[in-house]
Amino acid sequence: MRTALKKSLLVLAVSSAIIAPVANATNGYFAHGYSTKEKGVAGAGTAYSQDSLASATNPAGMAFVGERLDVGAAIFSPSPRSFTLTGAPNPGSFVNASPGVEIESEKDFFLIPHFGTNWQMDEDTTIGLAIYGNGGMNTEYNASDTPGGAGVFGAGDAGVNLEQVFFNTSFSKKLDDKQAVGASVIVAAQRFLAKGINSFGGFSLDGANLGNNTHSYGYGVGLKIGYQGEVSDGVRVGVSYQSKINMSEFDEYAGLFAEGGDFDIPSTYNIGVSFDVGSSAMIIADVQRINYTDIASISDPIQQLINGSCNPSPAFGGTGPAGAGCLGGAAGAGFGWNDITIIKVGYQVDVDDTTYRVGYSHSDQPIPEDQTLFNILAPAVIEDHITAGMTMRLDNNQEFNVSGMYAPSASVKGANPFDGGATQIEIEMSQWEIQAGWAWKH
């Protein structure tokens, strides 16, 4: 009976993880953590792994979690996602909003499933599979909320939707009782939709594939490697690196993203440490780096449209559109994001059959002040996460896990480059999440 139940839940979890949309922009558009346990300590886990989603952070840690199955889901709310205009807009400012009036995005709740399993091939070797979302961006601004019902950019309802899912197949090998190495092959799939931005058509090399098209899909394969080990009694260290994942182009948005619709996934690396505190508690800490400047469509600034790199259409004073800096060009304008470093610290303690967790993380701000216009579509300004969680051991083979996250409101305010700073655009977001999961262990 138990085996049949596990098989049924495995099929359900895998199916749900594949088909469910992911919109979980926390550290830029990366998730603040992956497994329920890891999220309870603010996403820290490079040096200490606790379940079969460990490969999402450090595949070496799969050597220490044993044979197990983890399934669960999160309810995530990035609300509000909003922007406010100050100053007196003019026809060339592109932004259609009443000064001082906050305009909020729709769709405040998202269901995000996850799944992981780990098979013990022999005493020192495991093979695992984890399916999870890496993050996302989602906004939807109703045209009816803007002056004249014209839309945020004067082209109707506006917004974007980026969804990503990762299939992480891992291999880990113990070097001895306290050290292990691991590697993962990651198959990534993503889809994207944008609407209400066709007013930028005079700056696009492919105006037919700028916006208001169907969802576009991209696929790619990457590699993650890691090490984890106890270097002295109660002290563990870990490192991991994930390669840049080259994705197939979003053909339907070849006139929006740089390099003809290219939207790859940036490289990341983690360094972590954990310390035992007495016989029942532990401090876990990570430093994570996300290299957004790997990707032109994410990191190129919007100023490429007006600094001479793009010769726009006659409607905007040019003879084009032509030039590498135009939307869709080899150096086309993008969201202007910076690389970010995230520091994560968590504490957990065992009390009888329950483990309690708390955590805090702080990230650099990915969005510069002069990049707020395009980032109305992607206001990923969150810098801080406060987390808590617990594990309740139900018997020798089962456990229930829960975690919660609150990200206090953060904002970035900067000048609109299209009107010489006559208007200021402030983008803002806060978030909360509740995640729960069940685990079966051998």
Image (cartoon, grey):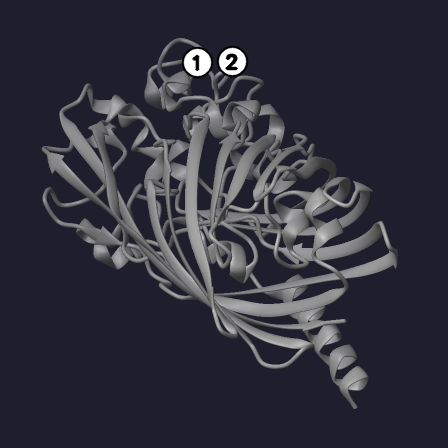
Q: Secondary structure at mark 1?
A: loop
Give the residue at x 45% y 23%. Answer: 333
* Residue 372 image point, x, y percent: 29, 32
Residue 149 to residue 373: above or below: below
> Which quadrant holds residue 2?
bottom right
Question: What crowding class fits label 1: few (fewer than 14 Cα within 10 Å), some (14-19), or many (20 or more)?
Answer: many
Give the residue at x 26% y 23%. Answer: 418
Observer-nearest residue: 135 or 161? 135
* Residue 382 image point, x, y percent: 33, 43
Q: Is residue 167 left or right of residue 37?
A: right
| Cβ–Cβ under 8 Å for marks 1 and 2 | yes
Q: CA distance from mark 1 to mark 2?
A: 6 Å
Q: Is residue 410 left or right of residue 265?
A: left
* Residue 70 image point, x, y percent: 65, 67
Q: Amino acid at mark 2?
A: Gly
Task: Say which quadrant the N terminus sits in.
Answer: bottom right
Residue 246 to residue 67: above or below: above
Number of the label disc, if any, that sits on residue 255: none
Question: What crowding class fits label 2: few (fewer than 14 Cα within 10 Å), some (14-19), or many (20 or more)?
Answer: many
Q: Residue furthest top?
A: 308
Number of the label disc, if any, that sits on residue 311: 1
Read off the residue under disc 2. Answer: 323
